[in-house]
Amino acid sequence: MGNVRIIFIFLLLSPIYIHAQVNKVLPAESRNMQLVGVSDLQGRPAYQPVIHQQAKRWIAYIGLHEGSEINPLNGQIEGNGTIAVDVTDPQHPHILAHIPGDYLDPGKDSEAQFVRVCDIANGTYLLRDAASRTRHELWNVTDPAHPEFVNIIVDGLKGTHKNWWECDTGIAYLVSQDPTWRRRPIKIYDLSDPVHPRFIRDFGLDGQQPGSGMEPAPGPIHGPISYQGRVYFAYGSSSMGTIQIVDREKLLNGNPEPTPVNLLSPQIGRLDMPRIWGAHTTYPMLGVHVKEFEKDAVGSVKDILVVTSETPREDCRNARAPLFLLDISEPQYPFPIANFLVPEQSGNFCARGGRFGPHSIQESFTPLFYGKMVMVSYFNAGVRAVDVRDPFHPVEAGFYIPAITERTKPICYEEQGKQICSTVIQTNNVEVDERGYIYIVDRSGTGMHILELTGDARAVLESE
């Protein structure tokens, strides 16, 4: 008993002590969404899932946050990189391979958060950042159980983020902190021949380019989405947000010298957000028929941009942002028309620990979901299914919050000399596939959960 008192007194007097909030193991929480299958992803904290159909198989490729774990496939400790999971039978997903984040030093702590997969040149290729976000690489994953290194596209970067790859053309938009630029731009490459990448140009907002004196410099690119002749850029993932709509042909074929005139030339429209919010994901939903306006002479068909602003801090120590919906029917004048948020009191989420608020949405354009349902990853509030058929009035159709497991790692931060930790679900990114399955991955190492909609939410997918 005396020893216990001594330890307790020491902790009280110590300038830094750990306050650990370990949530009791609650069952999963859900409405109109049910669990189909689970993969623990070897206990590795996960960022981005991409689902790819290869012949008769469905493979999930998952980019991972920094760290290292034992790979049971070979018994070796490997730095976190990219995991390939066979999800052909979603009730029984099984891991096929793990590619360490730094293939030159596979045992070192590493990460490879961002991943895209395309069928190019008679093979299936994986594009990823690597070596703790200092380079972009290509791997041949035609046999997903035996990935083969192809080449390094670009190296020596100060940071990377979420890329986009056009599988039909091979054009890749690589988010890359070039040391010569003031903020993180993109490097555009033609990867239609994966063995011989061809550089096209650098691109970013005016004020980010080398030599600019603009203050403050615009927020860094988080990620682009290219769709139907336009590229939708999101800058400043959690603050200093800018949404930019760009003409793809002018972007690819314009003068690549990064002057203010050349950087502005392909821009169609732009919206600068309040500084407390950012643009994490900009997802276009084009040609949405708005039933309320169907008898009107004009305006019954809308082009919509769905935008998330990432919640950056734990325990609600930030300006929480909703999910934004913008009317981009006139793309030169993007305009907010609606928003969606999860009420904090609905789950006492600020007291649960970890982050609470939106992060990302699915980026698949599968017709089953497109224009009907948007999946929003919401950190400790799990994943939320949002009915967007009426983009002026988005409503929640269902949700799923996984239970923590023995794999779930504490999330910690320091404030006023105290180390504060919480063991809590942190649903990080979400994706869907053409079969109707939903894939969420956990930032805290809980793994990947495969879900499906039920009840009224499922009926939305089946609606015309």
Image: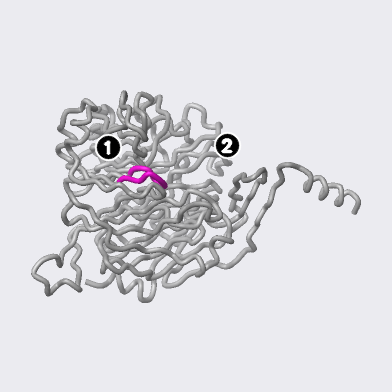
- Residue, far right: 2
Q: What is the quadrant of the N terminus in the image?
A: bottom right
Quarter of the view holding residue 323: bottom left
Residue 32, placed above or below residue 265: below
Give the residue at mark 2.
Answer: 76
Number of on-image labels: 2
Q: Tell me what residue is drawn at x 18 percent, y 31 percent.
A: 261
Question: In this picture, which residue range is highlighted in magenta?
Answer: 235-242
Say which of 82 and 409 sits in front. 409
Task: Specify the amino acid type for callout 1.
Answer: Ala
Quarter of the figure with residue 199: top left
Q: Secondary structure at mark 1?
A: strand
Label 1, label 2: how many angstroms apart (C-alpha)?
A: 33 Å
Instruction: Label 2: state its secondary structure.
Output: strand
Amino acid type at image mark 2? Gln
| Left or right of residue 179, residue 266 in this image | left
Q: Is residue 339 left or right of residue 73?
A: left
Q: Would residue 102 be visible to someone looking at this image?
A: yes
Does residue 137 show up? no
Q: Position of residue 124 (x, y in %)?
A: 30, 41
In primary-sequence order, the first of circles 1 and 2 is: 2
Give x and y (percent) for residue 61: 40, 46
Q: Which residue is mark 1?
A: 172
80 and 292: which is toward the camera = 292
What's the residue at 55%, 31% (across, down)?
108
Q: Main secondary structure of the magenta part?
A: loop
Residue 192 pos. (x, y %): 23, 35
> What residue sits 25% from the left and 39% below the top?
120
